[in-house]
Image (tube, grey):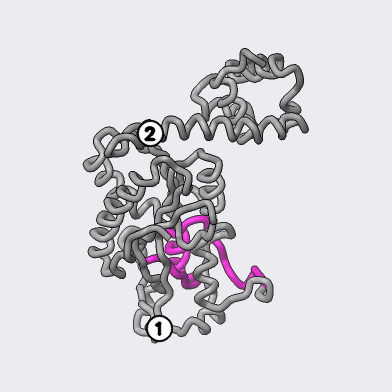
Amino acid sequence: MKNLTLRQLRYFEALARHRHFRHAAEACGISQPALSMQIKELEQEVGTDLFERSARQVRLTQFGEEFSLRIRDILRAIDELGDLARASGDKLMGRLRIGVIPTVAPYLLPTLLGNLARQYSGLDIHVRETQTPRLIQELQEGRLDTAIVALPVSEPALTETPLFTESFVLVRPAADADKPVPAAEALREMRLLLLEEGHCFRDQALSFCNVDMRATPLRDFLEASSLSTLVQMVDAGIGVTLIPEMALAVETRSASVCVARFSDPQPSRTIGMVWRKTSPLAKQLLQMSEVIRHATGTLHGQHGANPPAAPGPT
């Protein structure tokens, strides 16, 4: 296998990840026929099939599964060589892949990207928005450099550093503005609107209400895929919901709802940055977290949220 190319390995990794030729080709920025040809040449070079192909799906062969594990390690090592070169400078430059959870991305990114562009003129930022489990997986596999998530993630291989802590607020129909703020336990008796399963904010909201989903039928709750939809459902009189404070300005500006704060101790979450402990960019990422912390401090100063948490990795 002397004629394997790095390009072929990256195409293989994309197809192994997407399990779909068109999606993999789009991710690689090439045509589907070109991807198919490169995969066929790779299989000829290794002397066996790497994928099982059918009309509806693509799956790895048994050898392909083993091959994929080795290729993932090789590509991660190659990427870290590039990171090592970038780490030799004082500032981050070149491509930086940042993951962000959906309950943070729409509210933080406009301010954050502007601040980073001013601070790091040579930085080419690529943003990936998805749920925490996928971000952590992609971070560990070397497909992301850092991620902004709710802490703690409690992964031994990752460094965590807090950025800010924010409270959750109760969003109710406007007609409920004069009603007392219910206690956490009382929310269990109301129609509580939640994000769909997989969002960490959903788990945090349920924890505050002391709800055990194993003992509480799912039909007692209504779900949505975004905070925007939750607020619009409240506007329609369907129920009540919790949202993080940073989302208030964006999500309530066009909705006929009222906002209430809980008495202390208020429900809250800590948002922070995580990256691999082995990353050559660890020093630069820690410096970048200070820039982000300043940006989030400005943002939360506008909304009256809690001050930023103390800096430093955990």
Quarter containing the N terminus: top right
The answer to whether 311 is drawn above or below residue 54 in the figure is: below
- Please tell me whether residue 252 belongs to the stretch shown in magenta: no
Name the residue: 72% across, 27% down.
Answer: 51
* Horizontal side of residue 93 vs 202, given as left or right: left
Q: Position of residue 74 (x, y in %)?
A: 57, 30
Q: For marks 1 and 2, give the CA distance.
A: 47 Å
- Label 1 sits on residue: 181
Q: How many residues crowd mark 1 within 10 Å: few (<14), some (14–19), many (20+)?
A: some
Q: Nearer the viewer, residue 193 or 208?
A: 208
Quarter containing the C terminus: bottom left
Name the residue: 49% across, 52% down.
Answer: 158
Frontmost of labels 1 and 2 is 2
Name the residue: 65% across, 20% down.
Answer: 39
The answer to whether 94 is drawn above or below residue 161 in the figure is: above
Q: Nearer the viewer, residue 46 or 218?
A: 46
Are circles 1 and 2 on residues that touch, CB within 8 Å? no
* Horizontal side of residue 281 vs 294, given as left or right: right
- Label 2 sits on residue: 95
For badge 1, the amino acid type reads Val
Point out the stretch of residues depicted in magenta. 217-244
Q: How many residues crowd mark 2 within 10 Å: few (<14), some (14–19), many (20+)?
A: some
N-term-proximal mark, 1 vs 2: 2
For badge 2, the amino acid type reads Arg
Could you say which disc has been placed on residue 245 in the image? none
Is residue 30 at least partly visible in the picture?
A: yes
Q: Position of residue 303 (x, y in %)?
A: 27, 66
Q: Position of residue 95 (x, y in %)?
A: 38, 33
Quadrant housing residue 222: bottom right
Quadrant housing residue 23: top right
Q: Nearer the viewer, residue 112 or 138?
A: 138
